[in-house]
Amino acid sequence: MSKSKSSESVKVVVRCRPMNDKERTASFERVVSMDVKLGQVAVRNPRGVSSNEHPKVFTFDSVYDWTSKQVDLYDETFRPLVDSVLLGFNGTIFAYGQTGTGKTYTMEGVRNDPERRGVIPNSFEHIFTHISRSQNQQYLVRASYLEIYQEEIRDLLSKDQSHRLELKERPDTGVYVKDLSSFVTKSVKEIEHVMNVGNQNRSVGATNMNEHSSRSHAIFVITIECSELGPDGENHIRVGKLNLVDLAGSERQTKTGSQGERLKEATKINLSLSALGNVISALVDGKSTHIPYRDSKLTRLLQDSLGGNARTVMVANIGPASYNVEETLTTLRYSNRAKNIKNKPRINEDPKDALLREFQEEIARLKEQLEKRSGKRKKKRRRKRVGEGGEELDDDVEDEDDYEDGLDGDKNIADYWREQQEKLEKERSAIMEDHSLVAEEKQRLLTEKERKMDDLRREKEASEMLAAKVKAMESKLLVGGKNIVDHTNEQQRMLEQKRQEIAEQKRREREMQQEVECRDEETLELKETYSSLQQEVDIKTKKLKKLFAKLQAVKSEIHDLQEDHIRERQELEQTQNELTRELKLKHLIIENFIPLEEKNKIVMRATFDEEDDTWKMRPITRIQDDQQMMTRPVSAVGYRRPLSQHARMAMMMRPDARYRAENILMLELDLPTRTTKEYEEPVIAPKVAAALEDALREEEEIQVDASGLYASMAPGPGLDPSSAPATGAFAKKPKSGRPKTGKKVCTPTSGQSPSSSGSPLYPQSRGLVPK
Ligand code: ADP
Ligand code: MG
């Protein structure tokens, strides 16, 4: 089935809307004239009437004037494209033009009027009618709807309208919108509902719907998958994708005077459209090796439609009135270039991501499960019969029966469930009525029966759920003649066919006419044999005139293009100036207010994300940097975090916690107020003190000289001179004596002691008492 052409051009048609009421009342001049038969548009310069300027003529695949009907456009231009999508090609329809020239009218039209319905609703009808008439094919149709506004993609069918989607790329399937919702639709009604929901969401959040729609691109995507048994006995799936694109208004956005955010906004609004223009130019000039698809979301998403695997139709919408002439000419030139884009469409057969395949496999899996369940049931039943009957039944015969039972549709299954339930009920009531059983035994049997009934119910529910799931999935796969009731009768079908034939006829006529035009000029000189000099002069003059007119037309075209070019250049220069100024300001801020160190850090961290087309900051901590992160900065040896010199000084000098980086909590206990006094020594009378002092004196230090004592003092009553030691030796200190005190008084027991001298009769020391 791989029917593929090597290459074919993008088809470009022009449609001019009628004058609207405002234009008519202001009696604007019509400057556009159209030759529908020849496929030519001529635009007169409203100011060039006096200067005898020739109108500018453009030739297209076909042109539609203000009297054209939606259905004509559909039959002649769009139907063949949708037909090829049904065959498995990709197809794209663009509506291009200034705001208010009929892009939305062409794509959507007037919703409730069958006569004025646009391409999108007409294609719904077409697709589902085709499917209903198909034979031995299974179809799966799904729809998505998205919008690109200021380079942001919004899913018009999602619940969360604030969410923005991203473009991703896979090597096998190419560019796609991540997380874009798509709805499987089974009928015209369903897919219309999808479109309506999307249209409602389109206006949500738009403060001015007209402005919003003129600045955003809306893309309705229908994916048609078709499965058919091939000659090799295998099922083959073809997938066709139809993109229906209502582009933003092509008029120039004025950037003059806007700055900063507003300038950026204005630059973004038409970014996708100017990128589209650049892609077209790059594709047709034959010299470019790089096609700037990546410059905008729109061109990236529709890359295949421009020079790739798709059939593409572009509708250039123009207005007829004189005040639009500039934009009209721009539109015509733009689309004139697009004519030369070469596409390479091919049938997408058995792609990896076909949803239909997944559906088929899932259905098969579920059916198998269902089969298994009924298989289990059969076995149970057989076992039971054998057991209850007491005698063996012929197994083979039984098997056959059951097998047939199992295959025999829903009715048998329902019968089986009922039968089983009735049987259980019967058994239960038999137990209830059986009086021979003991109450306990009865209860046990009853609970068992209850349990069995519960099991049966559960199993039944599970089977039913499975069957419902299979049914739901199967209903999504559309099969010709079954799912959709074909309302069209034979006559209608004939009518349609005739219309198609007429459209085809017209197209061929037009092509031939265009060819004849071309040939005419070439052969003009060949067939000329002149009978007289005068005739030769006449004919040559005529020819000269014709060629001169052509020359003039080309000259004025060159002039126009140059003017256009200059204007565009000026605009670009202006934008560049604005952007340079902004850049300079940013530089100034960076140079003056951001420390060099910080700047370097940021520069080191910044990386360019190819996927998102933006600069991103790498996170500071990365797992592989952990090791590095473990080492402390030099400035903070011994501390948990870096400290400035000032802080370190302040920490040392100042008592408060202001500069303390750690341990800033005061951890001392808060003690209660004291209720006791400091110990104070008692006051001792000087005599007692002296006595004590003497008593506490170290005995080694005491010099005992009895003779001296007696000599110096009068004999006291307590001292017995006879008992005094006769020798001048030291008296030994008794070992068991009083504890040593810290006080070492080195005074000898001479009369130097004040007390000793004052009261000679007082026994001076216990230690001196003779033993
Ligand atoms: P755009 O989407 O290009 O901004 P619209 O499709 O909204 O323009 O058209 C602007 C108006 O012109 C609408 O009211 C529409 O009904 C009307 N209009 C556009 N084209 C035609 C046509 N071919 N026949 C009749 N009315 C048209
Ligand atoms: Mg519109």
Image (cartoon, helix red, strand yellow):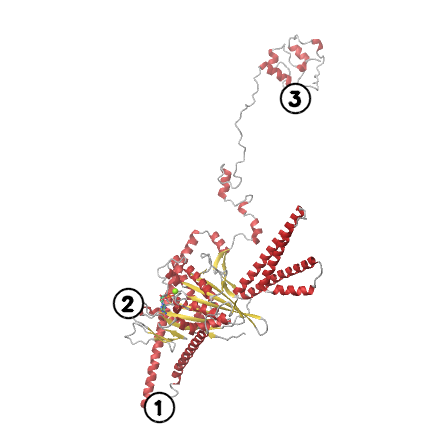
Does the beta carbon at disc 3 come under 8 Å from ligand 2? no
- 762 over 439 or under it: above or below: above
Residue 260 pos. (x, y %): 39, 57
**Spatial separation of the CA atoms under disc 1 and disc 2:** 55 Å
For label 2, the residue is 25
Image quarter where ligand 2 lies:
bottom left
Residue 228 pos. (x, y %): 55, 71
Q: Which mark is residue 530?
A: 1
Which of 583/722 is in front? 583
For label 3, the residue is 740
Q: Earlier in the sequence, mark 3 or mark 2?
A: 2
Residue 510 visible? The answer is yes
Q: Is residue 129 left or right of residue 768?
A: left
- Label 1 sits on what residue type? Tyr
* Label 3: which secondary element: loop
Q: Earlier in the sequence, mark 1 or mark 3?
A: 1
Q: Is residue 199 left or right of residue 50?
A: right
Residue 611 pos. (x, y %): 50, 61
Q: Which mark is residue 484?
A: none
For this orientation, the residue located farthest to the bottom is 531
